[in-house]
């Protein structure tokens, strides 16, 4: 009797998992049917791999706080004039007036200071 109850519980749990997976697929706009599941999942894997490559190729845009921290560190190391020069070369008088589009490039230049 206990084995039957355990098997019934397992079946109920599997049905619940199946329902949850179907709901997840609907949220992700993926149609899962037994006939096309391998093709769909293969396509989904290829698409997600392409998306991951595109995400990886994009340069992470640093925040103002990250840039400020790096510049403060370089200032303490005695490179105040070089840091100021980089800011001016990017068309700003001070860090807070620097265009956020320039943050990644400025970050690279400041990191290159030795």
Image (cartoon, helix red, strand yellow):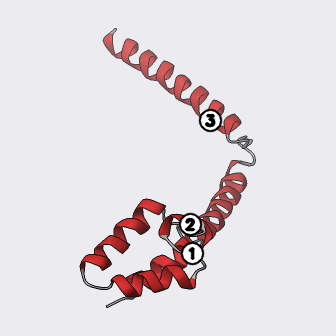
Image quadrant where one finds the C terminus: bottom left
Residue 83 in the image: above or below residue 18: below
Alpha carbon separation for disc pair 2 and 1: 6 Å
Expressed as whole percent of the image width and height from the top left, the position of residue 41 reads: 66, 53
Residue 19 appears in which quarter of the rendering? top right
The residue lying toward the viewer, choosing from 98 and 66, is: 98
Query: Which residue is drawn at the image coordinates 26% and 84% (left, top)?
Result: 78
Crowding near the residue tagged with mark 2, few <14, some 14–19, many ≥20 C-alpha atoms within 10 Å: few
User: What is the number of the mark on residue 72?
Assistant: none
- Identify the residue position indicated by label 3 in the image: 24
Most distant residue in the top direction? 1
How many marks on residues? Answer: 3
User: What is the number of the mark on residue 97?
Assistant: 2
Circle 1: element type = loop
Alpha carbon separation for disc pair 3 and 1: 48 Å
The residue lying toward the viewer, choosing from 89 and 110, is: 89
Mark 2 vs 1: CB contact within 8 A: yes
Query: Which residue is drawn at the image coordinates 49% and 84% (left, top)?
Result: 86
Circle 2: element type = helix
Query: Which residue is drawn at the image coordinates 58% and 80% (left, top)?
Result: 90
Query: Which residue is drawn at the image coordinates 61% and 69% (left, top)?
Result: 99
Mark 3 vs 1: CB contact within 8 A: no
Crowding near the residue tagged with mark 1, few <14, some 14–19, many ≥20 C-alpha atoms within 10 Å: some
In the image, which is nearer the foreground, mark 3 or mark 1?
Answer: 1
Mark 2 vs 3: CB contact within 8 A: no
The residue lying toward the viewer, choosing from 60 and 24, is: 60
- Identify the residue position indicated by label 1 in the image: 92
In the image, which is nearer the foreground, mark 2 or mark 3?
Answer: 2
Most distant residue in the left direction? 77
Horizontal relation, residue 29 to residue 71: left or right: right
Residue 109 in the image: above or below residue 70: below
Expressed as whole percent of the image width and height from the top left, the position of residue 46 reads: 66, 64
């Amino acid at each position: 009797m206990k084995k039957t109850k355990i098997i019934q519980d397992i079946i109920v749990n599997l049905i619940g998992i199946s329902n949850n997976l179907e709901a997840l697929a609907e949220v992700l706009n993926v149609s899962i049917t037994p006939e096309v599941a391998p093709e769909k999942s293969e396509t989904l894997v290829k698409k997600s791999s392409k998306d991951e490559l595109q995400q990886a190729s994009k340069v992470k845009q640093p925040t103002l706080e990250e840039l400020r921290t790096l510049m403060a560190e370089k200032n303490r190391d005695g490179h105040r004039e070089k840091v100021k020069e980089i800011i001016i070369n990017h068309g700003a008088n001070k860090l807070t007036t620097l265009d956020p589009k320039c943050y990644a490039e400025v970050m690279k230049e400041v990191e290159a200071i030795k």
